[in-house]
Structures are given as C-alpha cells and as structure tokens.
Amino acid sequence: MPNGKDLKNEKNIILFIGTVSFAILESVKQLEKVTNQKFRMFLLTRLKRKIPEKVAKNLTQIIRCQIDKIELIEKALVPYHSQIAITNCKYEAPMPLYARVVELFPYLKNPTSHSILVANDKLEMRKAFKRYFPQITPKFIRVIKITDVIIKKINEEVGFPCVIKPTNLSKSKLVITCYDKEELFKNLEDAFRKIKSLYKKDFAETEPKIIVEQLMEGQMYSIDGYVNSYGKMFYTPIIEIKTGKDAGYDDLFMYTQITPSVLAKEEEAKAQAVVLKATHAVGLRSCTVHCELMKTPKGWKVIELASRTGGFREELLYFSFGIRHNLNDFLIHLGKKPILKKTREMQTVFIKFWPHKAGKIKAINGLKKAQALKSLVKFRQEKKVGDYAGLSKHGHTFIVGFTLCAKTRSELLADIRKLEKWINIETVKSELELKKK
C-alpha cells in the first residue's frame, strides 16, 4: 500500500456505472491486496436512483447527474478524470450510460462504446453474428407490430417452436416459448402490453424492442471469459444450466447452474471457440464477457453475449475452483492477466424457485429443512408470504434461491433433489384477479 502519499493525486478511483452491489465493493479489497494499491470507490448514477444504505456507506463518493446528456456527465467527472483507473459496469440496464462514459476515457482499458451497445441489444448482436459467423446464431426476426403478415413471415422464416425475446431485458424477463401461431399471437400481445413498464422498472433507457427467434433444442451452458485489449480470451470453467422448462415449469428461466459440468474437455474447447467468435463479431475488448450457449445436434449456438460478469458467477467459480471472478474483472480493466485456477475443489450449484402459478404467496414450504442442509453456503429470499409472485417470463423475480456446495456431484445432486421435494410455493389468486374472472 502507498505510504504517506496523497491518494487524491494518484490514479486510484474505480468508477462504477449505474449501480453496484456490496459484494462487488468487497472484492476491491482483493484487488488492493494483489496490486498493493489502495483504491477509492465512486458511483456515477442518475439523480433520483435509490442506493442501498450498506452500499452507500462503503462508497467513497456518489456522483449524481442527468445521465442522458454527455456534457453533464463530462462536467461531473472532470474533477476526477485524471484519477480514474477503472470504469466498470456490472448490469444490463446502465450499459447505454457506460457506452457514453467510455468515450470520455480513451486511454483506459475499456470496451468500445459501439461494442457495448451491440452486446446490450439482442437484435444488433444477432445481426453481428449473422454477418461474421452465421453458423453460431439461430434464425431471428424483429417484430415491430403484430400483423398477419409478420406472423406468416415468422412461420416461414423462423418456424415453430420459437421464442419471443425483448432485446434489452435481463433475467429471462418476457422470454416466452411459442409452439404455434395462436400461442405466438397471444404471447406477442402480452409481451407488447408489458414491455414498456418492465423497461421502466429496470431503468432501461433503450427503445423497447422484441425479436422472435428459433427455439434451440439441446443442453444449455454458459461461459464467462476475460478478453484483453488484443482480443485474447481467458476462459473460466463452463457452467451447466438446467432451465425451468427442463424442471417442469412453463418457463425458460435458469433453474440450476452447476459447476464443474460433466462435459468432455473436447466439447468445452469447441464451446470456447464459439465464445471467441461471438466476442470478436461484436468487437468486445478489455472486459469480462458472459456468454450463454446451447449445445445442439447441429453444433454450438450462442443464446446471448454480454459485456459484463454473469449472475452469481463470483460464488459458483470461487466455491468450485477458488477463482475470484470480480477480482479478475478488475484486473482485465487494468490490462493485467486474470488469475485462473482449473483444479476442481468442490461441486457447486445455484438453484432458484418460482411458483408454478402466479398469485399471492400463501406459503413457502420446506424452508426450515432446506436451511439445515450441510451443503448450504448461501440463501436468498426475494419475496415473502403475502407478496405477489409471478412467473419469470412475465417479468417477475424468483422467490427463494440456494447456493449449495458438496465434495462430490452425487452428494450435490442428492441435495438438489431434497430441495425439489421440500420447497413448495403455494399461491392464491388475488381479489383483483378473482373479480376479473
């Protein structure tokens, strides 16, 4: 650590964009230990954004401004410009703001403004894949208006089953599978009715857009990697994903995320090659890349790519391999090589539960047993009894989530099965829903 120096005259600020979590702020301590340097933590955000008290207390400074005007952003950052070492955005909604901010820091290790915006828009992303590597992307069409002509075009060019997707929402919100024209028409109407309010709720400043793409059949996986300023990629171990559909829900959310996977090393190498193609097609550099993939009978296809860390990857990669994912994200922004370990230590899963039917939560059964599991390392509860609970495809969050860690895969699978038997979310129709009937 610097001794007797004026920290304000050093390049020692990490500027977080939009929002940040307490866990990410805690990871700065690891960076300070590795670099032998002290950092200050700043947050650039909108004027009225609420910041959790625990986060606010651990930030050095919160900079608030009107984020849609670049001249106001620049004015707010000018006093600290020469002291900023890293700019970092961890979430999807603030990415357009991040794209504006990086233009002000041409000499830092950042992705380009254009690549950030392409990676944050599923339509532009698909177009980039189609231009450079068409074999890695499914067929897709943008839907601006629901007409008989567009339904016919989807039927002819994309086919059934297909998936409706908003281009800028995270966590599988409004991702809906359709098996015929009737379902497609009904679900598109529902998506267009809800999309504006969900964008507003997520603080997404981009234009709400919807695409329909081919449903890919196969096993889902995801890989996070670190791409340096020369386009070289350093990969983290692959994550095996089971969707809500696989678990019997009428939904496509990520149900379980398990690592290590049982995928053969040769197949993992093929998946990594596809991640590299997707990254280069979009033009990302100097950032962490999160890629979701499908292993189909016709080869590996990309579901989506993002210029940020994947959800819950910090704990999945740490408990299984000892990899500090947030630390590596900081290091790649400093132009340093990430610290990777490939030796398996433990088997880890993050599993989430939604209700099978929307409604007011009457009971969440099995929590006491679940919280007594020896393999439980972290428990999350997003909603409680009395709250309204909806489906992921309609824009609602999970009710409870569990991170489990075991020595063997068989032990882990046994505990997952226990949770599946124990956890039952009971819902009842609200008075308003009953009146509508």
Image (cartoon, rainbow, N blue to C red):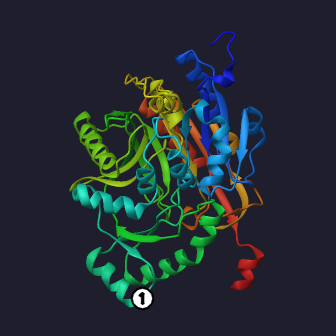
- Say which of 111 and 418 sits in front: 111
Quadrant holding the C terminus: bottom right
Q: Look at the image and tell me whether residue 136 can be seen.
A: yes
Looking at the rendered structure, the secondary structure element under dot 1 is loop
Quadrant holding the N terminus: top right
* Residue at the outermost top position: 3
Instruction: Identify which residue is drawn at 32% across, 85% down.
Output: 152
Please, is residue 239 above or below residue 406 in the view? below
- Say which of 78 and 323 sits in front: 78
> Which class describes the residues within 10 Å of circle 1: few (<14), some (14-19), or many (20+)?
few
* Residue at the outermost bottom position: 148
- Say which of 137 and 162 sits in front: 137
Q: How many marks?
A: 1
In the rendered image, residue 385, in percent from the top left (x then y), is placed at 76, 56
Instruction: Identify which residue is drawn at 42% across, 33% down.
Output: 409
In the rendered image, residue 102, in percent from the top left (x then y), is placed at 51, 45
Report the residue marked by disc 1: 147
Q: Look at the image and tell me whether residue 399 can be seen.
A: no
Q: Is residue 171 left or right of residue 425?
A: left
In the rendered image, residue 33, in percent from the top left (x then y), is placed at 57, 17
Q: Amino acid at mark 1?
A: Thr
In the rendered image, residue 66, in percent from the top left (x then y), is placed at 68, 56
Residue 289 sits in which quadrant? top left
Please, is residue 188 above or below residue 353 in the view? below
Instruction: Identify which residue is drawn at 59% across, 65% down.
Output: 199
